[in-house]
Image (cartoon, coloured by chain):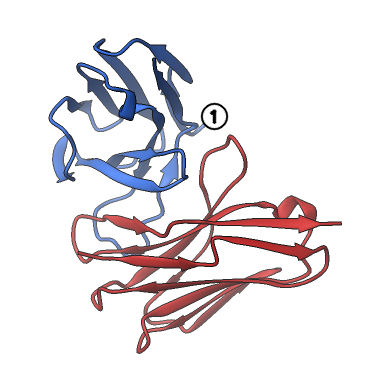
C-alpha cells in the first residue's frame, strides 16, 4: 500500500524518559512534516524537511530533535519527556515546497501519553 | 505569520440539511486553501482544496468558496449524512516553505 506510516501507534512512558517515533512514506514525496495535535484537537506544525534538509522549525523545545536519514523517512526523538508532551503526533508528506497545490498526506498518528 | 480563524467550533445539523464552516486568514500572500476531515481516532484527510485564482470549487456534495478581498473561505456540505460527522479543519499556506497553518477545527455532528 502506498501511504505514510508511523510507528509506534501508541506510546506510554514515564516523565523524564527519552522516546522516538518513526515515519516512512512511499509516495515519492520530497517533503515531510511533524505535527502535534493536542487534546483540544489543535494541529500545529513542528518541523518540516525537504530532501533531508530542515526547512521549518517552529518554536519547539530543543528536547525535540527530528532526523531525516533519507527523503522517505523522518523520525522524531524526544528527550526528557514532560506531561505536556502528551498528544497525538502526526507525520505528513507532500510534493515539493511551492505551497500551492501542496496536498499533505498524513500518517495514522502516534498517541503519546506521558505519566 | 499567518493566522487562520475558523467558526463555528461545533455545528449540529439534521441529516439532509446543509452545513457551512467559515475561515478567515491574515496573510495576503496565501494562495492555497485546503480542507481536511478528521474522523474520530483517524488521520486528517484532504477533502477539497482551492487555489487563489479560483472563486469556487465543487465536488459532489461539498463545495468551497474563496473571497480573496475579504480574506475568507468557506466549506459547504449539502444533503448531510451521518458519515459526514467529523472534525473539519481549514488551512492556508504561507508563501514559503510549504507551511500550512490550520484553523482550530469544527466538530460537525449530523443527527438522524
Left or right of A20, for residue B17: right
Residue B44 location, x and y as percent? 51, 45
Whether residue A5 is situated above or below residue B95 in the rendered picture: above
Whether residue B11 is situated above or below residue A3 in the rendered picture: below
Q: Nearer the viewer, residue B65 or B86?
A: B86
| Residue bearing the label numbered 1 | A1
Residue A95 location, x and y as percent? 32, 49
Whether residue B45 is situated above or below residue B9 in the rendered picture: above
Residue B50 location, x and y as percent? 45, 71
Q: Secondary structure at mark 1?
A: loop
Q: Residue at x 39, y 15 (%)?
A: A115
Q: Nearer the viewer, residue B75 or A18?
A: A18
Name the quadrant containing residue A24.
top left
Q: Residue at x 44, y 57 (%)?
A: B104
Quadrant of the frame with the C terminus of chain B: bottom right
Q: Residue at x 28, y 74 (%)?
A: B26
Left or right of B63, for residue A91: left
Chain A rendering hue? blue
Whether residue B59 is situated above or below residue B86 in the rendered picture: below
Amino acid at each position: 500500500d502506498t501511504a505514510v506510516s508511523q510507528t509506534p501507534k501508541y506510546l506510554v512512558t514515564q516523565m523524564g524518559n527519552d522516546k522516538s517515533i518513526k515515519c516512512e512514506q512511499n509516495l515519492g514525496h520530497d517533503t515531510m512534516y511533524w505535527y502535534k495535535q493536542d487534546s483540544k484537537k489543535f494541529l500545529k506544525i513542528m518541523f518540516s524537511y525537504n530532501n533531508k534538509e530542515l526547512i521549518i522549525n517552529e518554536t519547539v523545545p530543543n528536547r525535540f530533535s527530528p532526523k531525516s536519514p533519507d527523503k522517505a523517512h523522518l523520525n522524531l526523538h524526544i528527550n526528557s519527556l514532560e506531561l505536556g508532551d502528551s498528544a497525538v503526533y502526526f507525520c505528513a508528506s507532500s510534493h515539493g515546497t511551492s505551497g500551492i497545490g501542496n496536498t499533505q498526506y498524513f500518517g495514522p498518528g502516534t498517541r503519546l501519553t506521558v505519566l | 505569520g499567518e493566522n487562520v480563524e475558523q467558526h463555528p467550533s461545533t455545528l449540529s445539523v439534521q441529516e439532509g440539511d446543509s452545513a457551512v464552516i467559515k475561515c478567515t486568514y491574515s496573510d495576503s500572500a496565501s494562495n492555497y486553501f485546503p480542507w481536511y476531515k478528521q474522523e474520530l481516532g483517524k488521520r486528517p484527510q484532504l477533502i477539497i482544496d482551492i487555489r487563489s485564482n479560483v472563486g469556487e470549487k465543487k465536488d459532489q456534495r461539498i463545495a468551497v468558496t474563496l473571497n480573496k478581498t475579504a480574506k475568507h473561505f468557506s466549506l459547504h456540505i449539502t444533503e448531510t449524512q451521518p458519515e459526514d460527522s467529523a472534525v473539519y479543519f481549514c488551512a492556508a499556506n504561507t508563501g514559503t516553505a510549504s507551511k500550512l497553518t490550520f484553523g482550530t477545527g469544527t466538530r460537525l455532528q449530523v443527527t438522524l
